[in-house]
Image (cartoon, rainbow, N blue to C red):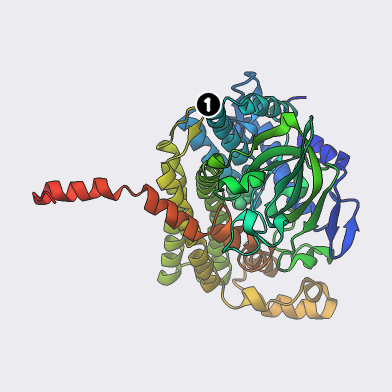
Amino acid sequence: MGLKTKEDYFDSLRRLNLRLFMFGERIENIVDHPIVKPSANSVAATYELAQLPEHEDLLIASSHLAGERINRFTHIHHSRDDLIKKIKMLRLLGQKTATCFQRCAGMDALNTVSAVTFEIDREFGTDYHQRFNAFLSYVQKEDLVCSAAMTDPRGDRRLTPSQQKDPDSYLRVVDETANGIVIRGAKLHITGALNSHEIIVLPTRAMRPEDRDYAVACAIPSDSKGVSYIYGRQSCDTRKLEGGEIDVGNPDFGGQEALIVFDDVFVPRERVFMMGEHQFCSRVVEVFGAYHRSSYGGCKSGLGDVLIGAAALIADYQGTSQAAHIRDKLVEMTHLNETLYACGIACSAEGSELPSGGYLVDRLLANVCKLHVGRFPFEMVRLAQDIAGGLVVTLPSEKDYKHPELGQLLQKYLQGVPEIATEARVHILRLMENMTLGTGAVGYLTESLHGAGSPQAQRIMIEREANLEHKKQLARDIARVEQ
Ligand code: SF4
Ligand code: FE
């Protein structure tokens, strides 16, 4: 098949037979549903940009398996340059969509499974890596989107998977046949679940020997028998059902999360990449965490570029752009945003080769990156709202604006500087509302906080990777002490 166009991608989604529920109802025409469509458009941008010669360097890579041209979202990184290009690609996509474009979680999962299956095989003599490469080759040839299904419901967080009152609180293997395994459980807030062709299931935490049945990694087609999806609501999502375009803020693009239920789903053996090797669950979590935490330095700085641009525009429209404090706030936003990007680039530039031959970002710097991502967008949102003024939350609706009588009043009283149409001001304020409070805030704020692990997970990794003993020795040497 080779590289898909945007239209090929939409056609392929239409061929999937996904069991989706939203607002208590089964949704049949998923792709064209007004709440889903913007999220599919965001993923489609990863196909569309790959077709453009000016973005080829970032979006096209060469498969290490077949040597063919593939979309970088299906690529296994084999150099620091690959890791850096990934960050640049994600920033570009963030700039073009101003939302979560969803395809990176699967890319990071592919890279994780490639690395860890190699290491499991080396330890136990299994053949997972070969199985994975066969799957990867299919994903690359068909240019597929994979979702990364990692986070389990986790029930009582004091207990391990096997200690839970409800054994399905973590996804597990409930049966094994000659040809494969049967899995049961659920995965929460799975990014781009409905826009994916494949689901890559990964363990979400370190496991003990008694948690063996929970130590499972595999891949299944997203429309496998027994798989159901329940759509995740986003703040202001039903504005997409109103038929307008101003009030949604970002009319073309959106993000998507869903809860996936696995009700005794059969997984053929060739698609099982870990089963029972509990010793490697923490390795999966660490490697995926490092990859995905670095990814945020790319995507979130791209979103930040759009927010900074909107804040600067609204200052122009309102006649405040020359005020010293507004200029300083834009400088501060830029400083915060470029710090995120710098962290994404830094952990990539300091990446190193894995036993599998793939490349992994520097783990300490990737965790520092993500810890910043959990903070700076919130500060940038505060500054953006400060620059915008109260209208960002008190603006009348699109219908008032289009009403013959009210519209005239709003034209008159919402006018900023005379050279700028009132409508432009309203559009930009709605975009800012979307990114800071509406559907877009899911990707820009809360996902920045909790996606790829909450801040405490990064702090734990930072403590682990800090190498304090080395730093103590540096201090001893300088101070001429020996203890
Ligand atoms: Fe990609 Fe960023 Fe969305 Fe994660 S949060 S899937 S890195 S766009
Ligand atoms: Fe994410």
Q: Quadrant of residue 304?
A: bottom right
Q: Give residue 149's position: percent from left, percent from top.
A: 68, 47
Q: Is residue 94 visible?
A: no
Rendered residue at 66%/27% (across/down):
70
Q: Give residue 418's position: percent from left, percent from top.
A: 62, 71
In the displayed structure, 127 sits above or below 199; it is above
Residue 237 is left or right of residue 323, and the answer is right
Rendered residue at 79%/63% (across/down):
240
Q: Give residue 220's position: percent from left, percent from top.
A: 76, 38
Beta carbon at label 1 within 8 Å of ligand 1: no
Report which residue position mark 1 lands on: 122
How packed mark 1 is, by other alpha carbons closer than 10 Å (few <14, some 14-19, many 20 or more), is some
In the displayed structure, 469 sits above or below 381; it is above
Residue 350 is left or right of residue 174, and the answer is left
Q: Secondary structure at mark 1?
A: helix
Q: Quadrant of residue 238?
A: bottom right
Rendered residue at 55%/64% (across/down):
311
Q: Nearer the viewer, residue 305 or 185?
A: 185
Q: Nearer the viewer, residue 335 or 228?
A: 228
Q: Give residue 351's position: percent from left, percent from top.
A: 43, 36
Q: Nearer the viewer, residue 98 or 106?
A: 106
User: In the current view of this chain or complex, which residue is farthest to the top?
Assistant: 67
* Quadrant of the rendering where the N terminus is positioned: top right
